[in-house]
Image (spheres, rainbow, N blue to C red):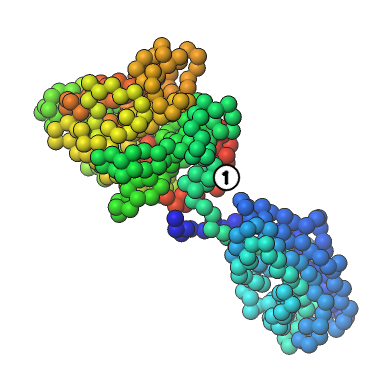
Amino acid sequence: MEKKNKKVTVIIISIFIVLILAILVSYAYFTTELNGADQIVKVGELELVLDETSEGISLDNAVGISDSEGLSLEGSTFKLINNGSKAVDYTIYLDDNTIEEIDTRIDDKYLKYNLVKNGESSGAYLLTSIGSNPNRILDSGTIEGKSTNEYSLSLWITDEVDGNYSGQVFSGKLRVEVSQDKPEGVDVLIDKANDPSNNDYNSSSLEEQKEMYVFNHSETYQTEALTDYRYIGSNPNNYVIFNNEVWRIIGVFPVVNAKGETENRIKIIRNEFIGSYSWDNKNMATGAEDDFGKNDWSDARLMKLLNGGYENEEVGGSLYYNRGSGICYSGHNNGTVSCDFSESGLNEEAKSMFSKVVWYLGGKDARITSNTGEDDYILERGNQVTSNRPLLWLGEVGLIYISDYTYTFANGVSDSCYNTITSCNVSEGPKSWLYKSNIGMYMIVHRSNNTRDIYVVNTYGADVLFGGADGGNYVYPTLYLNSNIKITSGDGSSENPYRLSI
């Protein structure tokens, strides 16, 4: 997968090497002050070390000296060490340090420097030639993994510029900025997934239960044979902060983007519902085949509430997508209720993290009693749909599939949990992290042998049933993050959720 974006980490060694130049009437005094131990910063697999190795420099000479004299000075030494395995780009800055209020800062035009890097001298240059604070760049480049750059820095007052700088001071500090191609979030999660040979979904290993499992799928009517990665069980490490809220990661899935390219994306679902609304509540007068709603997601009123581009709709159009408020569809025969997403709707940063992908809209006949996640997976990507219903939808915000739910049970398939509450042993505690007690959760899948029914997780949280699209079940927005989204921190636990960046 192509790496496009770089994460820039600013490492400020605030009092690592302080260069002080005090100008007195008769002489100049230049020294380095060391404060604290070597500075070590770890960023992912990268470890950078700046360590000052000299004891400082003391100069007793004329106020201004020549370049030859300056180049002969013994500099203050430090190292930049990459203990990681990957190359990183870096920039070393020389910043101003805070000086006492009674002191006067000497102008850079009076100062020259020499930087020796790995034995090669830069030569004598005015400090003004490398920029002004805070953009003075001493050195930049790429340091390979398991490599060290050794430096020696000298500063002096030049005799080439006349002026009155008696009693003035200079205080500086080193700052290093490093950047490294970090793996996309999908790669981070896949790297942590259980070994593909591990199909012990009831593993006694708590660590294995926390991460994704690998599922291989056969070819379907709409897709080739694919492999995806899913979190299962009751409490995996799949918490993530998105839209300044807690969401949960369903897994990593190969999806087709708007350009027709297949790429792995992280699929997430909001941890809490945004309200109870109709999946669709049209009647015959407003476009449905009967008065109980129309089970076509590509034209559903809930779809238009969740996605952008429907701002011209008088009721509900793009209100969740645009963090708006107004009237939403809920109830039989075009019923409406007040709705407000000014706090719970999508913010601009969140919307920049996802985009349109292909969602498969294969339906399920109520007469089919498939009991496994794989059976449902095949149907959802199949060609069994109600007359005039599309097989797929290109969109941004949707709902979970039946298979998304049934695969989460600890044995990898729904089996007996699918049809009856008693055999699912809910009384012993939920076996799926998607289990919601006493809440009916909408799904994107429709009943393929009528025009109005869609599937929901019923209010017991164990059965997957069908009901009229005009019902009032709960809405959990679901979407696929862009493939270039990074995971910057966290371990996915509820105490330390993953954090994302572009």
From this view, report whether residue 25 is shown above or below residue 354. below
Determine if residue 274 is in view. Answer: no
Q: Work out whether residue 27 or residue 469 is closer to the camera in this orientation and state it.
A: 469
- Left or right side of 408 for 467: left
Question: In the rendered image, which quarter is residue 289 located in?
Answer: top left
Q: Find residue 445 and report its horizontal and vertical position in percent.
A: 28, 31
Q: Residue at x 50, y 38 (%)?
A: 197
Element carrying mark 1: strand
From this view, report whether residue 15 is shown above or below residue 117. above
Q: Work out whether residue 440 or residue 13 is closer to the camera in this orientation and state it.
A: 440
Q: Residue at x 48, y 36 (%)?
A: 213
From this view, report whether residue 246 is shown above or below residue 411. below
Q: Work out whether residue 389 or residue 407 is closer to the camera in this orientation and state it.
A: 407
- Left or right side of 326 for 332: left
Q: Work out whether residue 68 or residue 372 is closer to the camera in this orientation and state it.
A: 372
Residue indicated by mark 1 = 489
Q: Find residue 35 and report its horizontal and vertical position in percent.
A: 81, 58
Question: In the rendered image, which quarter is residue 110 located in?
Answer: bottom right
Q: Residue at x 61, y 51 (%)?
A: 44
Q: Residue at x 25, y 36 (%)?
A: 382
